[in-house]
Amino acid sequence: MTDITTGKTAKLDIEGKVIELPIVEGTEQERGVDISNLRAATGYITLDDGYGNTGSCQSSVTFIDGDKGILRYRGIPIEELAEKSTFVETAYLLIYGHLPTKAEFQRFSQLLTQNENLHEDMKYHFEGFPSTAHPMAILSSMINASGCFYPGLLEQTRRDEFAVHAARLISQVRTIAAFSYRKSRGMPIIYPKPTYKYTANFLHMLFSDVYQDYELRPEVVHALDLIFVLHADHEQNCSTSTVRMVASAQANLFASTAAGVCALWGPLHGGANQAVIEMLSDIHRSGDNGSRFIAAAKEKGSGKKLMGFGHRVYKNYDPRARIIKKACDKLLAALNINDPLLGIAKRLEEGALSDPYFVERKLYPNVDFYSGIIMRALNIPTEMFTVLFAIGRMPGWIAHFKEIQDDTKARIYRPRQIYVGPPLNHYVPIEERRVG
Ligand code: SDX
């Protein structure tokens, strides 16, 4: 734990009793009030629906400034990593806290290759899913299933095995995803090739045939690798907080990240990339130029939201959306694809960013708004979009798991509540009960 105290305090006057709470400050001068002793000193807790104002921890993995649209992994701006790094190198940076030396990178790449295959008995698990099973359901269950083949995983004390388990998870999440896609289409599974690099191998496992390898076009491999880099971490988002919650109970790495997959699946979170394409396709089919949809998205009762727009932290343009939007134009031009959904997305963005409803609420495109356009161009089926988000986010989840595991003072996460249920009540035998 880093000493983030400032020596300054905030005064809180509760019914005439004044207490002083320490003010803390992070690396980028973001400030907080440490309320760790609030309940002991006053009997009061705080209430913060959705944790919009509550820091659950101190962390050194990722920094976001939502007002300025800044995102940095271990201090390095996302724009530099997007331009100069690769997903595997970025994964190492997030997990171990520094860019790898050549030797470290080689060792990490070797571990990914050595651990890219699932235990052969895992293939029987795939038999148990209906072909209509959502790949996120398969992914979350298969991560835990795969963990069963590594007894060492459950011995939390074996820190030296962490590197192997982390590499195994990053490598296998890709294999599980590819196998689940092939199974859902009734196609034979394609095993990873040890000579292929991470992202190329994933495309190979998805799209090669038994008799002919998929043609790995450099612009396609680069576009997908960029998607993974941009999704690799995002500080205390819903799924990462879920991973930390489960990790705080000292559950193992596979169990913690499987829980993260479940949280990410929600359409308000990682599931939004699938929802954006479904929204754009509906608008395209209806012949709407987007204005009808925007009008509906502003109406509370419509049940519609402009998916891919808005963010709890970014009150400015999500820097990842800006990078992905540029990558869309570049990839579609390289592949000579004219996707009408891109035009609709751009018109929606233009309309929303000039509409007082969105401007007043500081709603901008987020990472999910354009990412689906790239995945469509790569022939990734829509139901796999959130799985690819999970593949990208895996190193971030592992980095946060490690941050908790390495913290000798880590405590189990256990928020409080304000109870609003019935006052003291007593048991009534069934024959004496009246309709409620
Ligand atoms: C991700 O946290 C992360 O870092 C997540 C993520 C990551 O990398 O891990 O960045 C990935 O999950 C991105 C977000 C993907 N989700 C979507 O695109 C779904 C659509 N967006 C919204 O559901 C919403 O913007 C959230 C969930 C993203 C944020 O919700 P908040 O912070 O709880 O904000 P809110 O719902 O309280 O909205 C504030 C106002 C409300 O209107 P009023 O009550 O003030 O009148 O803005 C409105 C909302 O109705 N609003 C929208 C809207 N988003 C917010 N109105 C229409 N369309 C939208 N998309």
Image (tube, rainbow, N blue to C red):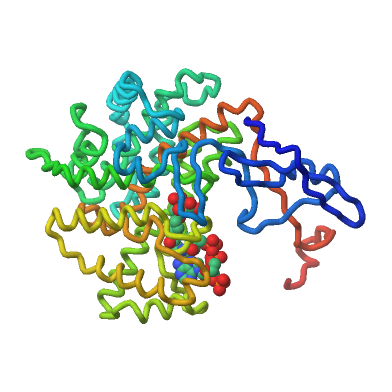
Give the residue drawn at x 30%, y 58%.
Answer: 325
Question: Which image quarter is the C terminus in?
Answer: bottom right
Q: So how many labels did they put on this image?
A: 0
Q: Nearer the viewer, residue 27 or 416?
A: 27
In the picture shown, does residue 381 fall above or below 146?
below
Residue 389 shows up from this direction? yes
In the picture shown, does residue 428 fall above or below 178?
below
* Left or right position of 194 against 238: left
Residue 124 shows up from this direction? no
Task: Find residue 403 and report its horizontal and vertical position in percent.
Answer: 54, 32
Quarter location, residue 291? bottom left
Q: Nearer the viewer, residue 228 or 405?
A: 228
Give the residue drawn at x 24%, y 52%.
Answer: 380
Quarter location, residue 304? bottom left
In the picture shown, does residue 311 fall above or below 397?
below
Q: Nearer the viewer, residue 131 or 333?
A: 333
